[in-house]
Image (spheres, grey):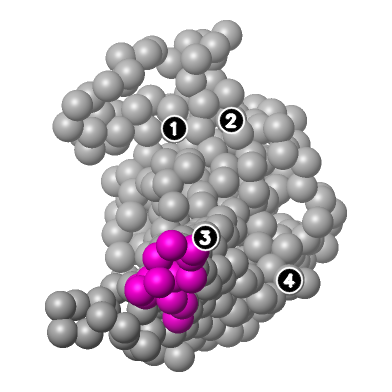
Amino acid sequence: MKFVDEATIRVVAGKGGNGCLSFLREKHRPKGGPDGGDGGDGGSVYLRANSGLNTLADFRYTRLYRAQSGEGGSSKDCFGRNGDDLIVNVPLGTIVTDVDTGEVIGDVVAEEGRDLLVAKGGQHGLGNARFKSSINRTPRRVTPGKLGDERRLKLELKVLADVGLLGLPNAGKSTFLSVVSNARPKIANYPFTTLYPQLGVVDVGVTNSFVIADIPGLIEGASEGAGLGIRFLKHLKRTRILLHIVDIAPLDGSSVIDSIYEIENELTTFDRLLKDRERWLVFNKTDLLPDEEVRRIKDEVLLALDWTNPVYNISAATGFGCKELTNAMMAALLQIKELTDPEKTDLTKDVVDE
């Protein structure tokens, strides 16, 4: 199934049940009295995070989600039944926006099972028994149930990943993902093989793992709509580390330094904070060049960029350097988590080299 990261739906909460107009009619109670009960509340619509979902594809076909209305009250002071709430499952990382007002209602990134209210059910109406008083023994007043909220919602999915891959088309991102994780992306020797984000779980040792995301390759002008990358650049916002994979031996003879600057420019244009995100430089396809040439290009690039972040040489095709890189990423992620988690729970596990 292809990745779908945006959808527009309509949610309608249930209407509250009407109050009942009724008077007691029983033998041996000639005076009777009002006994109309209240209606039931309308059901609300909630969005629930579900880790088993990773796409909004289902919302392309089902666009209307309606909760149950409350039942009307009845005689003998019987209240109407409340309408059932409607729970709509969405992937973790879904941002919910009101289409008409532009208001961001919520961000479904919390733990699984936590619900986000997006449409509140209508309040119940009151039966005439509610209006009985010492001066009005036979009230004929009732109130109708109120309508529930109705909204058009834009659902936008931002994938939740610890590490994000970025680079030009054919830099080898998909091959790297397939080597280090259980993901099986499409791999081919032409640009834009990756048409939608791919997620993979990288197991490091026995007890540690992290999620890595591969987005479509970026090209010049991606931040303004060129190519496929603009639609998925937002997915990188939630990653903790960006892995910039560079083809050290491009077939077209283009400059490695220029290709790195091209990606940096797109990140800055799209969101300046992305450029400041921790970013590692990974030279891929090093098996295609002699060691001396790899060192020369690497030194030249690092000097030109004044690079101070981690740098790695790998060959995704042969697996060279990939294990060392994943171990280093796991260690860095554990350190980041320890610094950002005040309770520092479950963060003492060591990265295991197998």
Q: Cα distance, mark 4 to mark 2?
A: 34 Å
Residue 25 among magenta residues: yes
- The tag on residue 81 is 3
User: In terms of sequence position, does the residue under pointer 4 or pointer 2 come before the other?
Assistant: 4
Q: Which residue is identified by label 4?
A: 62
Mark 2 in CB contact with mark 1 (< 8 angstroms) = yes
Q: Which residue is identified by label 2?
A: 202
Q: Which residues are magenta?
A: 21-34
Query: Which image quadrant is residue 255 in?
Result: bottom right
Q: Quadrant of the C terminus?
A: top right
Q: Cα distance, mark 2 to mark 1?
A: 10 Å
Q: Quadrant of the N terminus?
A: bottom right
Of marks 3 and 2, the one in the foreground: 3
Disc 4 residue type (three-letter) = Thr
In-image side of 26 versus 229 (left or right): left
Disc 1 residue type (three-letter) = Met
The residue sitting at 49% across, 37% down in the picture is 312
In-image side of 240 versus 64 (left or right): left
Q: Which residue is identified by label 1?
A: 329
Q: Residue furthest bottom?
A: 100
User: Tag 3's secondary structure?
Assistant: loop
User: Tag 2's secondary structure?
Assistant: strand
